[in-house]
Amino acid sequence: MSINTKKKQSSKKTAKKPAKQPPKKVAKKSSKSQIQNTLPDIEENFSEWFNEILFQAEILDYRYNLKGCGVWLGYGFKIRRAFLQIMRDLLDNTPIPHDEMLFPLLIPEDQFMKEKETVKGFEDQVYWVTHGGLTPLEVKLALRPTSETAMYPMAAKWIRSHQDLPLKTYQIANMFRFEGKNTRPLIRVREITTFKEAHTYHESKEDCANQIREAVSIYRNIFDSLGVPYLITQRPKWDTFPGADYTIAFDCIFLQTRKALQLGTIHNLGQRFAKTYDIKFETADGNQDYVYQTCYGISERGVASLIAIHGDNYGLKLPPVVAPIEIVIVPILFKNKEEKVLKVCNEFYKKLKKEGFKVRLDNRKISSGRKYFHWELRGVPIRVEIGPKDIEKNQIAAVRRDVKGKNFIPIDESIKYLSKLLKDIQESLHKSAKKRHDELIFRTNDLEEAIDFIDKNKGIAEIPFCGEEECAASIEKRLEGLKFLGIPDRYLPVLNKKVKKEKEIYCSHCMKPVTQYWRIGKTY
């Protein structure tokens, strides 16, 4: 008998029990739905998250066969409409109201080229119409990249006397700019589908300055309503709107990328355009003078900031003021009790509707969990759940989207409670976003510290600066994508009765004595 055979026989007699295998790792059940599991992580890949949320939450479909153009979907269009309504309400109800108008899209070339500085700022972005059908046009037509050259020839016909002033107008229209860089939905596009531009005309430089302050106040109210935090900054002279005396901008730092997105701009145009387009008026003493002008615009970037600032890995978080649906009612159904639950839910829906809430009853024949995730993705501020036990206790369960947790409320107290809860959510979203936003601003006298802070994607820096373009260019070369945003609002005479001046600080580059910090950072 061979040794090997003996070993085999021996092994049969003394066979050991098989060793215990380590327990198999059971994948943790995700609290997210299958749809939400397809959302990229908002912190790790914000750009993909943003694109996915636009499509999955039915805001925008960017599959249109033309780069930089997309289709507003039903849910997104309602958000857009609410955003526009906030703007319209503010502009229409200033002490001297703005009048909404609508100007032509096409601008004849000779009229467009009349304001050389404006054209210089947009010359590489203009779309030109060269044919009418098959017939070449004698004069090319520009698709408006901005509307000064369309509006101001008309203003020259309307304004004759100081009694015609101030004239305050605005339009909400499409703008077209050939964007050569990589386009981004709502942020960098070739067709701006939601451009509000206001243009005002005044008797004096002082009236113009007052209008700038009013415009800043309007912008504050718009973005406060959206719960979007912002920085107010006067742009450097080399980055001022072509033809303007100065430009004030509202920027928002995206919490995920630490880059600043320009949300809106306000321009003091002085008399430059008035002299170009001969917009004159007869003064009170019978003389002739050119009007003083301002203009200010906001695009759909306001919606982009709303999505980015409040969103999370579960989807949107919408402030109630712009949410298409404030409250969704989800019936909790059990066998043989469906009819009773649906009856109570339907009655509660009608009650909320009568009280003026934007409410939806979700009675689809799918699981409650799928409904939860569906409405979380779309950022509905409050979910109300009603099941058999709630009916027995004469209560509802209220779940708010911005923070986790569920509260049970007597039905008799529900209207008052839900009204207050919506206000709390509106304020809470704004407060928490502003707190996070403020933490992304770093003030230092040391240029190396500022560059390091920005390079590590920590946010925006404020540094002492002399304001010279040559100095700025040297600093901007230090880091790819670095840009000077400009002078913080606390230093601007037009916005402050008492202007702040810093003591014993020196330009962080050339070391000249200066009295201001400037903002610098990466931008979209």
Image: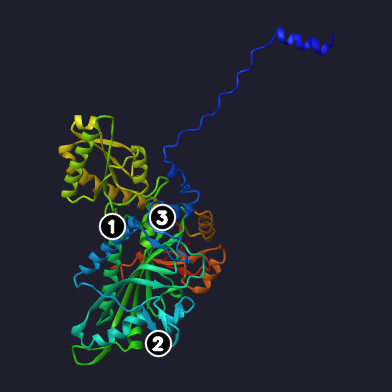
Q: Amino acid at mark 3?
A: Leu
Q: Secondary structure at mark 1?
A: helix
The structure residue drawn at horizontal position 22% and vertical position 35%, both measured from the top left corner, is 339
Q: Looking at numbered disc 2 in the image, what kind of residue is underneath it?
A: Lys
Of residues 131 and 31, the one drawn nearer to the viewer in this rendering:
131
Q: Nearer the viewer, residue 506 or 61?
A: 61
Q: Which numbered disc flags the more N-terminal residue, 1 or 2?
A: 2
The answer to whether marks 3 and 2 mark residues whose Cβ atoms lie closer than 8 Å is no
Q: Which residue is mark 1?
A: 225
**Mark 2 — residue?**
114
Q: Residue at x 29, y 82 (%)?
A: 292
Q: Which mark is residue 234?
A: none
Circle 3 sits on which residue?
54
Residue at 38 percent across and 78 percent down: it is 244
In the image, 187 versus 252, the foreground residue is 187
Which residue occupies 26% across, 82% down? 204
Q: Earlier in the sequence, mark 3 or mark 1?
A: 3
Gap between marks 3 and 1, in whole Å? 21 Å
Decide if residue 169 is in sight here. yes
Q: Residue furthest top?
A: 13
Badge 1 amino acid: Ser
